[in-house]
Image: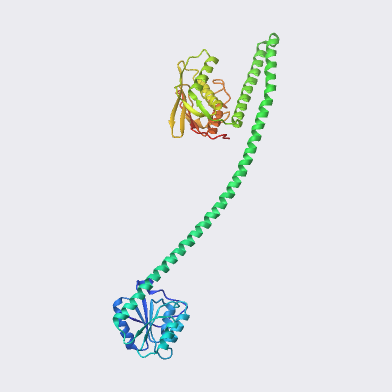
Amino acid sequence: MAVQVSPTPAAEPIPSRDAVSGRASLLLVDDQPEGLLALEAMLEGLGQNLVKARSGAEALRALAGEDFALVLLDVRMPIMDGLETARRIRELERSRDTPLIFVTAANDNDTRVIQGYALGAVDYIVKPVIPEILRSKVSVFVELARKTELVRRQAREMQRLNESLRSQVARLERAEREIRTLNARLERRAEELLAVNQELEAFSYSVSHDLQEPLRGIDGFTQALVEDWAGTLGAEGQDQLRRVRAAAQRMGQLIDDLLQLSRVTRAELTPVPVDLSALAREVAEELRERDPGRSVEFRIPDGMAARGDPRLLRQVLQNLLGNAWKFTSRRPEAVIEVSATPGDGGATYAVRDNGVGFDRNFVGKLFRPFQRLHLRRDFAGSGVGLATVQRIVRRHGGRVWAEGEVGRGAAFHFTLPSAPPEGAP
């Protein structure tokens, strides 16, 4: 059914009927009811939304509140004729580009036709109107309106996407600026930490080095006292001097270990291919020569290869094999095994023993300097060796961990990548 237009406030436009129903709105303007009925009858079969207006003023009110695909406008109307109505239609922002088809009498002169085209008319239809021609022309403009609306929607969606993209780009730019700021702060912090570490290492090295001389003096003088004044000192005095000398020697060993730890941190890393099997056998032979009274079975396979600094990797094996040697001292049939397991980008190595093991609840303390899980009177040592191992392995880009059980031995694992970082700190 057609809808008779009632006045609609221009300040609050109503939504397009096309957006609501999917149909195009057509505005039919004629002061004669029979003319409107005739147009409605001819266009009813198109299935569009037909809006009727019986004057130019009524048409303008309709156009102010709704979008139309086409306006069919009678030229001859009282008060405000079709030409004046067309001029005012073009003055409205909303209907500036709305297609206009004039419906005119056959005896209208060419001047009125030309005026109509000048006002933006797209076509003329002469009364009496032929229904087929009218429907054909209207269908073209309905399809044009649909496509135009589709383009508008796509343009609005594109604009929305562009705004979203601009917003995302702005957020990314802010994030990038924040990251640059944080990186600059981190670089400054890293430089500060590097300077502090270098100062601490230099201080540790200097103090350790300077402490060695007085300790050697204490050790030498106590030994001279024991040798030269043994008769005068008596058994108790000699025992006390031996205790002093033993403490000085332990402190000297601790200072040596600290110096070694400091050198590991400061030493330049020079990665080359290393035969770990040969290195492990050399360290095992040194342990046998140092304590020839012990019987220990070493299981060291051939072909264990790595890439790293040979001097530092030797220290790793000296500490791990030395620990295994020490903690298997109470085993009549001690076994120390070295193994390697290839993996992606490197290999995992292990040193296992069947010694006293350790409580797995305290495994986190093993690689901290000066941490001991056994009494000094049972097993000598400063507690620096495993910390040294960890630093060396980390400098090679690997990691180290331990497994063990009290009374059932221990296993120390470490990884070495196939290409450790050159000159790693």
User: Foreground: 109 or 128?
Assistant: 109
**Quick check: 178 left or right of 219?**
left
Q: Residue furthest front?
A: 110
Q: Position of residue 97 (x, y in %)?
A: 44, 76
Colouring scheme applied when the structure was drawn: rainbow
**Quick check: 9 left or right of 125?**
right
Q: Quadrant of the N terminus?
A: bottom left
Taking 215 as reference, is 108 above or below it? below
User: Foreground: 152 or 12?
Assistant: 152
Taking 255 as reference, is 104 above or below it? below
Residue name at image x 29 percent, y 82 percent: 131
Residue name at image x 36 percent, y 91 percent: 107
Q: Is residue 34 visible?
A: yes
Q: Position of residue 129 (x, y in %)?
A: 31, 85
User: Foreground: 25 or 388?
Assistant: 25
**Quick check: 89 left or right of 193?**
left
Taking 389 as reference, is 76 above or below it? below
Residue name at image x 68 percent, y 29 percent: 206
Count of marks placed on residues:
0
Q: Is residue 56 visible?
A: no
Q: Residue furthest top?
A: 231
Q: Position of residue 175 (x, y in %)?
A: 54, 53
**Quick check: 170 left or right of 28?**
right
Residue name at image x 61 percent, y 43 percent: 189
Taking 395 as reference, is 142 above or below it? below
Q: Quadrant of the C terminus?
A: top right
